């Protein structure tokens, strides 16, 4: 008998609405082969919804989401709604309410893609960024005063708790134990005098509990440079909320395109649904042109399968992606091709069918 999962699908805005159906089609197709059925419950929460209702999601939105096994999100944000409104009205409340305190972002150069970096061999980039996802620089603490006067000011406090930092770092150390046993921490404790030395202290304290993992610390500016100059040195990287967000856009660039980078907002304890989304945003500049790359959303779907315990099905999705990239010239313009979202999706469906036939 098939295992059925109830998934909340939030396509969101812009190209989110174009890549979501592509990923759903691929997951349905692969699911069929592995006895997995997805019951998609589409929620129209978005900037368009905001324009109609004044809210990014209804007042009982989080309660409704709680009932689902997982959440599959496209992209959030559109001109006309300030970005902080769309993010704090949907994405961030979900991450926080459901204790999705890990944002897992693989940075892997897939077969068939040339990195924009020179002389990077096919398997030369393969690391994971563990981004702390519930606190840090993404904080509501602060305020504005004297608006509209020459004395106007804004204060934004970062919030780093021992509990929050420890759990992100423990997750990262554990992940490194199961991979290449190297963990790099992104810091900036030379310039940021309170939170970052605290971050470093906890990183060093925990190192003793994971003697098989080699820890290293880098100031974020140097780390960004090394992502470009020597990406092969990294295995797992742990970073605060903002640092992790910025680093992973760079990570996406060195693996060829932000259009393919996936992420999982993980509640490791499984008390709440986790949420899977591409790293990219809604890309209003290309929305409606039907040429968005669906691979980031599809890869996020593979992460969801993995999280649900279907490693074999996740691998089948990744095999399909690799086949399309390595063995066909079908790719969207962000990867130098001319194919549409639908053409890439069709090729991907054919690739997963081909796997079935083998
Ligand atoms: N697909 C993800 C998305 O729409 N992201 C919008 C964004 O700006 N996210 C910032 C963040 O992940 O903190």
Image (spheres, rainbow, N blue to C red):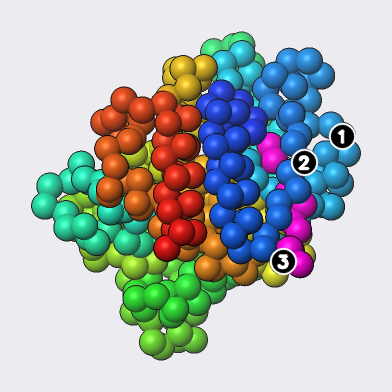
First of labels 3, 1 by sequence position: 1
Residues shaded magenta:
1-10
Above or below 83: residue 345: below
Residue 23 appears left or right of 93: left
**Marks 3/1: CA–CA distance:** 24 Å
Residue 151, image quadrant:
top right
Q: Is mark 1 on a helix, strand or loop?
A: loop
Which part of the image, by quadrant, shows the N terminus?
Answer: bottom right
Q: Mark 1 points at which residue?
A: 59
Residue at (54% x, 57% y) in the render = 303
Q: Label 3: which residue?
A: 270
Would residue 214 be visible to someone looking at this image? Answer: yes
Q: Does the magenta stretch include residue 111?
A: no
Farthest residue, direction left:
119
Disc with the residue nearer the chain's start (1 vs 2) = 2
Q: Which residue sits furthest front? A: 357
Q: Residues within 10 Å of mark 3 (few under 14, many from 20)?
A: some
Q: Which of marks 1 and 2 is in front?
A: 2
Provide residue 12's location: percent of width, then percent of height.
64, 30
Q: Name the residue under label 2.
A: 41
Q: Which residue is rendered at x = 11% and y = 52% of the image?
A: 119
Which element is circle 3 on?
loop
* In the depicted structure, whether residue 57 falls above or below residue 157: above
- The residue that appears at 49% across and 44% down in the rendered structure is 349
The residue nearer to you, when weighing 165 against 297, is 297
Mark 3 vs 2, N-terminal side? 2
Q: Which of 151 and 22 is in front in this view?
A: 22
Judged by its main secondary structure, the magenta piece is strand
Rendered location of residue 332, percent (x, y)? 36, 31
């Amino acid at each position: 008998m098939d295992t059925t999962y109830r998934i909340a699908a939030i396509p969101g805005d812009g190209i989110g609405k174009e890549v979501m159906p592509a990923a759903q089609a691929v997951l349905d197709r692969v699911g069929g082969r592995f006895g997995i059925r997805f019951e998609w419950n589409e929620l129209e929460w978005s900037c368009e919804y905001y324009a109609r209702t004044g809210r990014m999601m209804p007042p009982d939105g989080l309660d409704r989401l709680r009932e689902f096994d997982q959440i599959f999100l496209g992209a959030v944000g559109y001109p006309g709604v300030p970005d902080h409104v769309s993010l704090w009205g949907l994405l961030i409340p979900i991450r926080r309410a459901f204790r999705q305190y890990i944002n897992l972002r693989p940075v892997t150069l897939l077969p068939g893609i040339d990195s924009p970096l020179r002389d990077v061999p096919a398997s030369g980039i393969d690391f994971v960024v563990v981004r702390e996802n519930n606190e840090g620089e993404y904080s509501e603490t602060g305020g504005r005063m004297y608006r509209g006067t020459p004395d106007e000011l804004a204060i934004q406090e970062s919030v780093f708790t021992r509990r929050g930092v420890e759990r992100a770092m423990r997750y990262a150390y554990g992940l490194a134990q199961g991979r290449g046993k190297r963990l790099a921490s992104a810091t900036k404790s030379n310039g940021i005098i309170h939170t970052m030395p605290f971050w470093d202290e906890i990183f060093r304290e925990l190192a003793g509990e994971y003697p098989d993992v080699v820890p290293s610390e880098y100031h974020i500016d140097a780390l960004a440079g090394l992502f470009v100059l020597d990406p092969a040195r990294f295995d797992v990287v742990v970073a605060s909320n903002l640092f992790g967000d910025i680093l992973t856009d760079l990570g996406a660039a060195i693996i060829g395109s932000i259009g393919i980078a996936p992420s999982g907002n993980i509640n490791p304890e499984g008390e709440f649904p986790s949420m899977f989304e591409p790293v990219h945003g809604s890309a209003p500049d290309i929305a409606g042109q039907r040429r968005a790359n669906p691979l980031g959303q599809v890869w996020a779907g593979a992460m969801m399968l993995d999280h649900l315990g279907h490693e074999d099905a996740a691998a089948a999705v990744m095999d399909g992606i690799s086949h399309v990239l390595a063995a066909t010239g079908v790719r969207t313009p962000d990867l130098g091709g001319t194919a549409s979202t639908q053409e890439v999706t069709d090729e991907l469906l054919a690739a997963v069918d081909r796997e079935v036939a083998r």
